[in-house]
Image (spheres, rainbow, N blue to C red):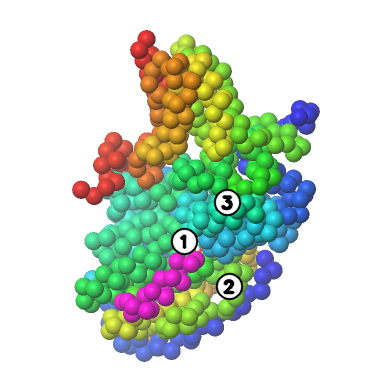
């Protein structure tokens, strides 16, 4: 990485830059989705891309999520590398047959004779007042489907490196983009680079407890860690970045060091990915080092409400993380 | 932007003048009043939004008032509707309490959905509004189920199912029309056709000129009407409602209109020209209806203005009262998720 060429850009710009650079490199990469062309995407991610690549490769579609997912799957089966944008992660419900029963299964089911190199970009999460049908985090569903990879970057740097890696990956990769992260700024190298999909990162070092967080929960956990540091509690924040495949080692190493772990995500707790993380930790060598039970802080088991106060109360906020981590740090001491 | 726009082949208003004579004065007054209320409600919603009093999103139907009012005017009070994200018009036309509706828009505990749903999800179940869906096309299969229940219970009620032009490209639309037509369910499918999805003109996303042509695939009546002519909408939907009520099954009515505002909140209008927007503003359905009423000597100029001003005052009052209502509390949300 040549740091001379690093500048501050937003998460949204990082996603766009990754697509642009891969499309320049490889003619077989194209973007397909609703309003991605003229409109530049519902969140403006593909703004300007139509001008450079034209309507064939920045392909505006009818409102037809099943056919969009099928078009991407079929093109990928032919060896192209489609990036499909679904306008909100919630609408993957409509694409699910193609993604779960076709894209995820074809390679194995056809005896390894084909591969499906596609990316599904999905704006996820709550916080915009869009209510129950435009605010979900559905990663747990997809993690449970063999054949699909799931990535959830939390910073502009990670977004670019992971998206390029996802486009180059030979499998369907669900790429979650939290809407509240789009405006987050951070240093990103100008040139293309990749981050291996199975690589967690320690976002902050600390000795007292580990917080495992991904997507929007990473900046929230880092902010919580700052506050706790002022109280003398040193928190280590680990971001798996990719939920599947999962870099277990980095997490296990951290928990073995701190002896306490808080797992947090925005999706509801019941059946959530945090349960998988907890099982990985409990079933590992880190178990012997645990000084307190593994804790989870997840979204409440409710649809996301419209009202702002209710909406915020439905998912973990910085203060909730601070409170949970503080309690955990003191537990059994 | 260079998309070739096929002019929809819209059936001309045949019965407007007859209807002006046949419909009771009170009905015509009701129509104009509801159209004005919808317009003022949405202008107020926009104003509250601009002033930062609303957290969330909204989709305005300014310019499309004739479609919701003309269609719902054909219903009996016990009939039902189910609709979509651009749903303020349907909700008001179905007789919603404007203060309760404004309260929902503002996310208040006293709103129709107790602040849980918001602008995009207003439902008034006891008033026969079975709710708005934010997932494009998502309400159409549900409409099949509602109509199925009506049929199985030998009810005389009918259902109007609303959706946008863009929604007719979802598989759910096609599966639903097929099923409803096969079972001759008592539902009228109404396309609130404002000619665009978010940015995509209908001509860029379908290979036919009129959405009503899709009815042919399901062997049901289909008609495209001038959605800015409240009486034309009334006439077309009335026939379809009678068809449904008499057990002959569903129809598809395509009401061609135009949304004046951006898709949601605001947008940069990169997909259409300012001239096009201005052209459609000149076809304002409310101004047009007033003119028709005055020219046919059904109402005087001052009568239409009085209706207009009453509507405006009603909305002002609703917005003022709604802002004083209490916020919901997040404490017991889990208890609200499952029925007891
Ligand atoms: C299944 C689904 N896909 C995409 C969206 C995002 N979206 C919201 S409204 C809209 C356009 C809908 O167009 P149309 O059906 O014509 O209704 P209109 O908004 O014009 O009233 C889109 C793409 C959505 N809400 N649901
Ligand atoms: Mg439309």
- Report crowding for label 1: few under 14, some 14 to 19, many 20 or more residues within 10 A (C-alpha): many
Q: Position of residue B104 (x, y in %)?
A: 34, 51
Query: Magenta span has B160?
Result: no
Mark 3, other Cα within 10 Å: few <14 / some 14–19 / many ≥20 = few
What is the span of residues highlighted in magenta in the rendered image?
Answer: B170-186
Q: Quadrant of residue B274?
A: bottom right
Point 74% across, 50% down: residue: A23
- For the point 41% across and 55% down, the residue is B120
Rendered view: A126 above or below B216: above
> What's the residue at 57%, 25% (across, down)?
A250
Answer with left or right where residue A227 lies relative to residue B107: right
Query: Looking at the image, do the residues carrying marks 2 and 3 touch, with CB atoms under 8 Å apart?
Result: no
A177 left or right of B151? right
From the top left corner, tell me how far across and down residue B64 is, in percent.
Answer: 46, 69
Where is residue B194? Give x, y as percent. 51, 69
Q: Quadrant of residue A56?
A: bottom right
Confirm or reject: label 1 Cβ below 8 Å from ligand 1: yes
């Amino acid at each position: 990485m040549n740091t001379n060429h690093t500048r501050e850009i937003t998460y949204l710009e990082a996603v766009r830059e990754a697509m642009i650079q891969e499309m320049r490199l490889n003619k077989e990469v194209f973007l397909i989705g609703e309003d991605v062309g003229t409109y530049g995407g519902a969140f403006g991610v593909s703004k300007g891309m139509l001008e450079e690549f034209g309507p064939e490769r920045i392909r505006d579609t009818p409102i037809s999520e099943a056919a969009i997912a099928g078009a991407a799957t079929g093109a990928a089966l032919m060896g192209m590398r489609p990036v499909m944008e679904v306008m909100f992660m919630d609408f993957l419900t409509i694409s699910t047959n193609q993604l779960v029963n076709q894209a995820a299964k074809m390679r194995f089911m056809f005896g390894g004779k084909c591969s499906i190199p596609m990316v599904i970009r999905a704006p996820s999460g709550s916080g915009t007042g869009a209510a129950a049908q435009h605010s979900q985090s559905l990663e747990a569903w997809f993690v449970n489907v063999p054949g699909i990879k799931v990535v959830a970057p939390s910073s502009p740097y990670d977004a670019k490196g992971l998206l390029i890696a996802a486009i180059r990956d030979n499998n369907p990769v669900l790429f979650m983009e939290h809407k509240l992260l789009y405006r987050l700024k951070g240093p990103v190298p100008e040139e293309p680079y990749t981050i291996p999909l199975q690589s967690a990162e320690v976002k902050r070092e600390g000795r007292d407890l580990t917080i495992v967080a991904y997507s929007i929960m990473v900046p929230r956990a880092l902010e919580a860690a700052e506050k706790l540091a002022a109280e003398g509690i040193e928190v280590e924040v680990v971001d798996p970045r990719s939920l599947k495949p999962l870099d277990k080692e980095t997490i296990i190493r951290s928990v073995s060091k701190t002896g306490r772990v808080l797992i947090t995500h925005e999706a509801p707790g019941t059946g959530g990915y945090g349960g998988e993380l907890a099982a990985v930790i409990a079933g590992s060598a880190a178990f012997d080092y645990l000084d307190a039970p593994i804790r989870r802080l997840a979204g409440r088991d409710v649809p996301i409400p419209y009202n702002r106060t209710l909406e915020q109360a439905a998912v973990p906020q910085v203060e909730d993380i601070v409170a949970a981590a503080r309690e955990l740090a003191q537990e059994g001491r | 932007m260079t998309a070739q726009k096929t002019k929809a082949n819209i059936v001309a208003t045949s019965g407007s003048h007859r209807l002006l004579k046949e419909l009771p004065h009170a009905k015509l007054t009701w129509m104009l009043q509801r159209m004005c209320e919808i317009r003022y409600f949405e202008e107020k919603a926009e104003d509250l939004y601009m002033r930062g009093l609303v957290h969330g999103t909204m989709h305005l139907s300014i310019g499309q008032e004739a479609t919701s009012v003309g269609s719902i005017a054909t219903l009996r009070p016990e009939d039902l509707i189910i609709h979509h994200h651009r749903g303020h018009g349907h909700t008001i036309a179905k007789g919603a309490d404007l203060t309760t509706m404004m309260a929902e828009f503002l996310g208040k505990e006293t709103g129709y959905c107790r602040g849980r749903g918001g602008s995009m999800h207003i439902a008034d179940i006891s008033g026969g509004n079975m709710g708005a869906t934010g997932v494009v096309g998502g309400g159409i299969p549900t409409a099949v189920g509602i109509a199925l229940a009506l049929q199985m219970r030998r009810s005389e009620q009918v259902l109007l199912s609303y959706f946008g032009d863009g929604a007719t490209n979802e598989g759910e639309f096609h599966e639903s029309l097929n099923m409803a037509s096969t079972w001759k369910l008592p539902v009228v499918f109404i396309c609130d056709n404002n000619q665009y999805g978010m940015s995509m003109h209908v001509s860029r996303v379908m290979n036919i000129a009129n959405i009503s042509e899709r009815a042919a695939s399901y062997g049901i009546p289909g008609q495209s009407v001038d959605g800015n002519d409240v009486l034309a909408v009334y006439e077309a939907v009335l026939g379809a409602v009678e068809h449904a009520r008499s057990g002959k099954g569903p129809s598809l009515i395509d009401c061609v209109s135009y949304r004046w505002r951006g898709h949601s909140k605001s947008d940069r209008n990169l997909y259409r020209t300012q001239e096009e927007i201005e052209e459609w503003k000149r076809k304002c359905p409310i101004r047009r209806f007033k003119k028709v009423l005055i020219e046919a000597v059904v109402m005087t100029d001052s009568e239409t203005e009085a209706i207009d001003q009453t509507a405006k005052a009603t909305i002002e009052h609703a917005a003022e009262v709604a802002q004083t209502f209490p916020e919901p509390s997040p404490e017991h949300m889990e208890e609200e998720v499952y029925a007891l």
